[in-house]
Amino acid sequence: MTTQQAPSFEVQSTPEETSIFLAGTWTTLHLDSVERLFMDSVLNAARSIVVDIANIARLDTNGAWLIEQYRRKAVTEGKQCSISGAEEKNQILLTTVEKRTKDIEAPKPVPFYISIFNDTGRNFIEQCKITLNIIGFLGEVVTALLRSSIRPRRFRTTALFYHLEHVGLRGIPIIALLSFLIGMVLAYMGAQQLQKFGAQVFVIQLVQISVLRELGILLTAIVIAGRSGSAFTAQIGAMISNEEIYAMKTSGLDPVDTLVLPRVLALLIMLPILGFIADMMGLLGGALMVWQSLDIGLHGFIIRLHETLNIWDFYVGIIKAPFFAIVIATIGCFQGMQVTGSAESVGRLTTTSVIESIFAVIVIDAGFAIFFANMGI
């Protein structure tokens, strides 16, 4: 067995010239031991450098590239560098490396309009994949619901009531306050504009239609997406980080049955109730502002509301609630399951969950608007 000699170099320097004598095996597997010292030696060399490679036992492409880098660094430092003593095969390798590296061109910058199309297409495909995965996850939730319907003992009743409290009862104050303020703003803006045309009596109808058909349930869904959807992602993600999910699977518990299904059902039950509360508080805020701006009391507001109220305005809003609930809960739990274990992953996916939930809610709301318009409702 032949032992290959490690690469080495010796520096002999005069004020006018520095000679560097290379020896040993200058190949890929051995260069680490000498690379840094060899490259640094150019700094203390004289203005004229001669690299003698006559005693090199073996040279491969990486060794030749290291010598070429040394020569270029010397030129960059304002010095002259030549290579001497090369055997024919080593000289061919050095010449090839020098020519090939010169042929390498810097990549041409991609025009901005091409990069825009590339980024848009890449993001579109990525979002399509995520959407398909969420639909597949929803299928798992429906399957878990059917299993629990057949065997009710699998269902986690305690977890359901826990999430009913946290999703519903604790969310009432913020939703009621925001809806009340939105009702006031709507009535104020409507009164300001309609008074110019002597049509201030229609302010009540404006508040009624806006709150009951759209803003009540839409505002509730957005608040729940930011509050409960993000909480679902963070809670499940933290459990993955602590490896509690793996412990559940090891114990024979299905995370979808245990964690996801109670959250989805809790939101499915509570979102219509919260939407109803938002409607009532929005109308109350509108009534208060109408009384303040137009001097129409609560009794007059109720009479006018009764005259103009179309019950389908209320149904159109409440019908959307279960769809919003399923989307928000599914996206929140799905993103929680995608956490990879780090705190950065939990934070990033929590933000993603909120953005995707709000986007999905608005898309569904637009779809319902088109549907009801075509149905003449």
Image (tube, rainbow, N blue to C red):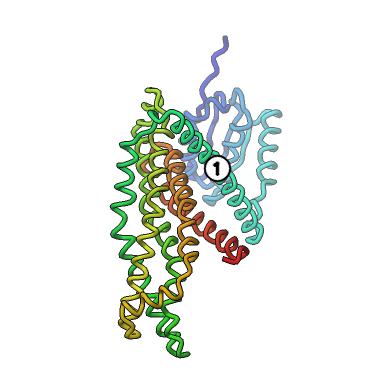
| Residue nearer the viewer, 163 or 149 | 149
**Vertical position of residue 8 compared to residue 220: above or below:** above
Question: Circle 1 — which element?
Answer: helix
Residue in the image at 36% along x and 56% along y: 274
Residue 200's image quarter?
bottom left
Residue in the image at 34% along x and 75% along y: 287
Residue in the image at 34% along x and 49% along y: 167
| Residue nearer the viewer, 229 or 244 | 229
Q: What residue type is labelled 1?
A: Ile
The reply, left or right, for residue 360 in relation to residue 281 is right
Q: Is residue 11 visible?
A: no
Pointer 1 residue: 135
**Vertical position of residue 1 compared to residue 35: above or below:** above
Tell me residue 286's x, y (percent): 36, 74
Tell me residue 78's x, y (percent): 54, 52
Q: In which quarter of the image is the C terminus?
A: bottom right
Q: Is residue 285 visible?
A: yes
The reply, left or right, for residue 111 in relation to residue 360 is right
Residue in the image at 44% along x and 50% along y: 325
* Structural crowding at the residue carrying mark 1, measured as other residues with C-alpha within 10 Å and reported as few (<14), some (14–19) or many (≥20): some
Tell me residue 107's x, y (percent): 65, 51
Q: How many labels does the image show?
A: 1
| Residue nearer the viewer, 351 or 193 | 193
Tell me residue 259's x, y (percent): 38, 36
| Residue nearer the viewer, 275 or 86 | 275
Residue extending farthest to the top is: 1
Residue 198's image quarter?
bottom left
Q: In which quarter of the image is the N terminus?
A: top right
